[in-house]
Amino acid sequence: MNEKLSIIREEALAAVKAASSTAELNDIRVRVLGKKGELTAILRSMGSLAPEDRPKVGQMVNEARAEIESAVEARTAALAAQERDARLKAEALDVTIPGKKRPLGKLHPLTQTYYEMRDIFVGMGFTVAEGPEVEYDKYNFTMLNIPKDHPARDMQDTFYVNDDIVLRTHTSPVQVRTMLSQKPPIRIISPGRVYRSDDVDATHSPIFNQIEGLVIDKGVTMADLRGVLDVFAKELYGEHTKTRLRPSYFPFTEPSAEVDLSCMACGGKGCRICKGSGWIEILGSGMVNPKVLEMCGIDPEVYSGFAFGIGIDRVCNAKFGISDIRLLYENDLRFLSQF
Amino acid sequence: MRIPMKWLSRYVDLTGVTAEQVAALLTSRGLEIAGIEQLGEDIQNVVVGRIDSITPHPDSDHMLICMVDAGSGEELQIVTGAPNVKVGDHVPVALHGSHLPGGVKIKKGKLRGVESCGMLCSGEELQLTEHDFPGAGEYGILILREKPDIGTDIREVVGLNDQVLEAEPTPNRPDFQSVIGVAREVAAALGRPLTLPKPQVKEESGHNIHDFVKVEVENGELCPRYMARTVRDIKIEPSPAWMRDSLRAAGIRAINNIVDITNYVMLEYGQPMHAFDLACVDDNHIVVRTPRPGEEHVTTLDNKERELTPDTLLICDAQKPVGVAGVMGGLNSEITENTKTVLFESAKFNGYSLRLTAKRMGLMTEASQRFVKGIDIEATQTALERACELVELLGAGKVDRGVIDVVKTDLSRRTITARPEKINARVALEVPAEQMAGILNSLCVPPTLREDGLLHVEVPHFRDDIEGEADISEEVARVVGYDHIPLTLMRGDLSRGRLTLRQRRVDSVRSLLCAEGAYECVTYSFTGPAAYDKLLLPENSPCRSSVKILNPFGEDASLMRTTLAVSMLPTVALNLNQKAESFRLYEISQVHFPAGQEGVIPEEKQMVCIAAVGPQEDFYTLKGVVEQLCGGLGIDDYSFAAGGPEYYHPGRKAVLTIAGKQAGVLGEVHPTAAENYGISERVYLAELELDALFAGIVPERKYRALPRYPAVDRDLAVVLDASVPAGSVAAAIRKAAGKLCEKTELFDVYTGSHVPEGQKSLAYSIRLRSDDHTLSEEEINSAMHKIVAALEKDFGAKLRS
C-alpha cells in the first residue's frame, strides 16, 4: 500500500511538473484527486487494512493529497500567467493606426471669436442683452441723438424698411431698449448682426457683427472706460497689449474716442498689417451723451456712463489672419474646417 | 478735405514744423490726417534752362540741336523735336538721370547720331494742363514766359513744391472743411498766433447795389441768411499763379478769375459762393423760393435737366429759376467771357433739405457737401467781403457799394455755463478752471471765468457743435490729451455677469450639433422672390410674405428671409461644387415675418437649420440628429408626423411637435428644389425654431428610485399593413402593456419573402418590469397577450411565425 501510494505521488508530481497547459493540469487533478481518482481509490481500499494501520495510511494519503494539490495549484498559477502573457503578446496592436471616431463639426470662426470676447466681458460683470435686427428708426437713430436731419446719418448707410423702420446699423438700439426698461446700474454688452449698405469689398460687408458695451452708474468716468478697454485688450491679445484713445465723434457719446490697440502682429513696431503705424483701430467709444441719457429717462445729473462698440468680424479676421471678410459668409468647408 | 501746407502757412507760422508733425498733432486732437501728399513727387532733376543757340540736326529735317544753359556752369547739348523754341526762351530741362511723371527716366543718349544730354519738356510731359500753368496746354515745349532763374527746380516754378494734408473731418466739425478752420486748430496746437485776413473792400465802381438789385427770401426756414454784392466791369482772365497753385493743391481745377475766387473763398472759409451773370437775372431781382406750380425742371450748369420737387429750394430771378440753392447754378446764368456784371451770393441754406435735394439729383458737390454739414453763419459775411477784396486785388472788376443781407434767423451766439468740477469728473482729469479757460481761448471759443467758479462760454457759430458741458469736457480732454486720463476699473455694487438660461441653451444647441459632426455656417439674411420660386413655394405661401427693403442692393437681396433654407441650399451647392462629398452643416439665425400692422417692427424668430449630405446620410440619420438635439437639450415630449412645406420630398418629410406645438420640419429636399440650386445629390434638411424647442425642455428633474426587481425582455415580431406608421405601433404596445412596460424598441423592419405583398414585419424588443415585485410567468404572458390582441385589433397585425 505504501509503495503504491508512493508511486501515485511520484507519478502525479512528475505529471504536474511536465504539464504544459492548465487543461492538462485539470486532467491530472481529476485523475489523481477526483472522486474516482487514484488517491480516493486508496482511501476507499483502506477497509482491507488492519485497523491499527488505517490512521497512519490515512495520514499518508492526506499528506500526498496536500502535496499534489499544492503542486497543481502552483503549476496552474504559473501556466495561467504564461498563457496570459502569450495572449497579451498575441494581442498587441499597431497604436499608430488612426482611431475610430464619429466626425465632429466646428463652430464658425465668428462664433469662436464672439465667445472669446463675450467671456472677457462676462468675467467683468457684464450681462448679455439682445434685441431685434429690424428696428425702429427712433431706437436706432433718434434716441441716440441722431435726428432725421443730422449729418451723421450719412456716416451710416442705412437699409430702410419704411420711414420708421430700418435694419439696425449698430447694436446701440439694444442699449436704448435696456435704458428704457432697466434702472441703473447697467452693465451690458449687446452682440449681434448689423446692416449697412456699404459697397462690398475685402473689408466691407453689408452684414457684419458687433459687440457694443454700455455701463451706467453713479460716478462713472472716462477713466473707467479706459480701464475696461485696457483689461479687454490685454485679455484678448496678451498682457503686453497697449491701448490708445484718440478724439473722435459719435453723436451718442461726448467725449468720443477711437481706440487703437498696439498691433498684435508686430507688437507696435510697425508692419504690413498695421500699415507701419504700430496701431490698429478696433473700437469706437465714449462717455454716453447726456442728451441720450435724458431721452432714455435717466437723469444725467445723477448718472453717467460709457459705451463702446467693436466689430467682431474685424477681431476675427485679425485673430485668424483672414484677409477677406467675404470668406466668413461663404461657408466653404475647406475654410470652416481650418479653425 | 485737402489742406495744402503753403496755404495753411498764410494763417499760422509753420517755420520749423514739418507736415508730418502737423499731421500728428491734428490726428491726436481729433482731426484725422489720412495721408500727406508730396506734390510733384514724381518729377525729379528737372530745372529751368535758357536756350542759347539752335542749329538744325544734320540727319533730320524736323529735329533741332539746342545749346542750353541749365545753371550747371557748362552748356548742355540737347536735341529736341519741337519746333516752337527760340533762342533766349526759358524752358524746363530734364537733366541726365531725371524722372518725369508716369515713371519716365531721362538719360544721356544719341538721337540720329547726335549726343543729347537730356530733354526739353512739354507741359504734357510734366502732366500740366493750361489750367495748371499758362502755356502748358500749347503744343511743343513749355515756354516759361516769366523767365524764371536758370537752374531753378521746375516744381517751384509750376507750384508743385508743396505738401498736402489729406484731412478726414468728423461730421461734428464742419469748420474743418476750410483751411482757416484747420489753421485755427494748428495754431492752438502749436501755441502760435493765428493771423486771419481782414478783408477791406474799396468799392470803387461808383454804384450802389441797393439802387438796382433786390433780394427776397420767401422761405426763411430753408435759407436763414442770404447776402449779395455786385461787381461790374468784369474782366474774365486766368487768375494768378498763387491762386491757381492753391486751388490745384486743394484738388480744384482753376477756371477763370471769377470762378476761382468763389472756389478759393469756399476753401478758405468753408463758405460756398456763387457768382451769377447779372445780365441773365431778370429785373436784377433775386427770389429764394420753392417752385411755383408748373415749374418742374431746371437746367443746371452741367447742362442737365433736373426735376424739381415742391421742397427744392431755388434761386430765381423775377421770372424763372437760375439755380438750385446750394447745389448748382443754372446754365442760364453761367459766367461767360462776355459777363460784365456779377452778383456774388453768399448764403446759408438748410442742410437737411439740401441733403435731400442733392441726393435726389445725385449732385453732392464741394458746395452742397459743406451746406449739408453746416456752415458758419458769421463767415457768410466775411467770405463775401473776402471775395470782393480778391476781385479788387486781382483787378477782375469794380465792386459796387453796399451789401444786401437778408437774415431770417437769430444770429446771436449760444452761451453755456459750465461747472469745471463736473467737466473734470466726466473725463477723470484735474484741470484747473484757469487752464480750461486757456484751452477754450486757444480754440477761439472765448470763455469768462466767473467769480462763482463757473465758466461762461460764448460759442461762435463756427463751433455750433458745442452745445453743453459735455462738449466742453471733450474740448478740454482732447487738448490735454486722452493719454492723461488715468485707467481705473468700475466701482459700485458687484454685478453678476452671466449668461441667461436661454443664451446658455443656444450655446448648447451649437455644441450638440458640432458633436453631431455639423459645421456652423453664417450667411446673409437677404433673399429675393426668385429664391422663393426656386423653393417651389406657392404664391400664397406664408413664407413669401417677407419684410421688404426699400433700398436693397438688388432684387435678389430685397427681402429679409423667412426661411434659412434659401441660404443653406446655396451653401450646400457651393460645397458640393468644391468636391465635398459628405458633410453636415448648420446655421443659427433670425428669420423675419411682417408684423401685419403698419409701423410695427417685424416678428423675429431664431431658427436652426441643419443640412446633411452624403452616401451614408438618409432621412433617419438626419432625424437622429434632431432626436439627439432634443435629447441633449433635455426635451422628453417630442413626436414626429408626416408633413412639411413644398420644398421637401412629399413622402419623406416630417413635422416635429414639441409639447403640443409645431417646432420644426425635417426631411429630404424635393429633387426639383435641389435641382433649382444645381444640386443632384439628395440633401436632408431640418429647420427648427429654437424657442419652440426650448419650451419643451423639462425644467427640473427629480430622482426616481432605482428598480429593485428584475426586468424581463421579450421580443415580438408582427406582420401588418405597410402603411401603418411604426410610431403608432409602439404607442399601442405601450398602451396595452400599461405601466409594466418599461421600454419598447423597434429593432427590425422587414419586407420581402415570407411577408405578403403590401405588408411589413416590425420586430420590437419589449422590456417589462414591476416596481414592487418580481413578475410571474403568468403576468408576463398576460401582458404579451394583451399587446398582441391590441395590435391585431388596431392594425390587423398578425404574429410573425
Image (tube, helix red, strand yellow):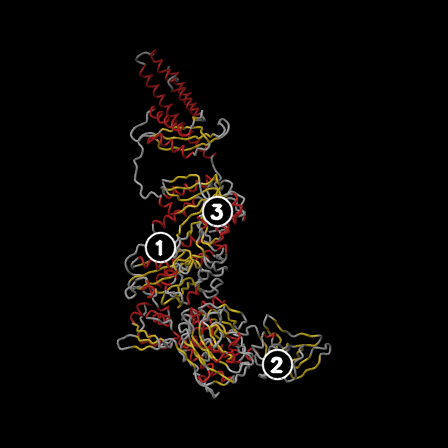
Report which residue position mark 1 lands on: A128
Is the C-beta separation of discs 3 and 1 under 8 Å?
no
Element on which disc 3 rests: loop
- The quarter of the picture where residue A140 lies is bottom left
Is the C-beta separation of discs 3 and 2 under 8 Å?
no
Report which residue position mark 2 lands on: B143
Q: Residue furthest left?
A: B452
Front-lying residue, B300 or B718: B300
Q: Using a 10 Å C-alpha cutoff, classify the residue at mark 2 as few (fewer than 14 neighbours), some (14 to 19) or many (20 or more).
A: many
Kind of residue sitting beneath label 3? Pro
Q: Residue at x 29, y 30 (%)?
A: B772
Q: Is residue A130 above or below residue B75?
A: above
Q: Nearer the viewer, mark 3 or mark 2?
A: 3
Q: Residue furthest right?
A: B59
Disc 1 versus disc 2: distance between alpha carbons?
A: 71 Å
**Residue B257 percent across, percent down from the top left:** 53, 80
**Residue B462 percent across, percent down from the top left:** 40, 75
Report which residue position mark 3 lands on: B538
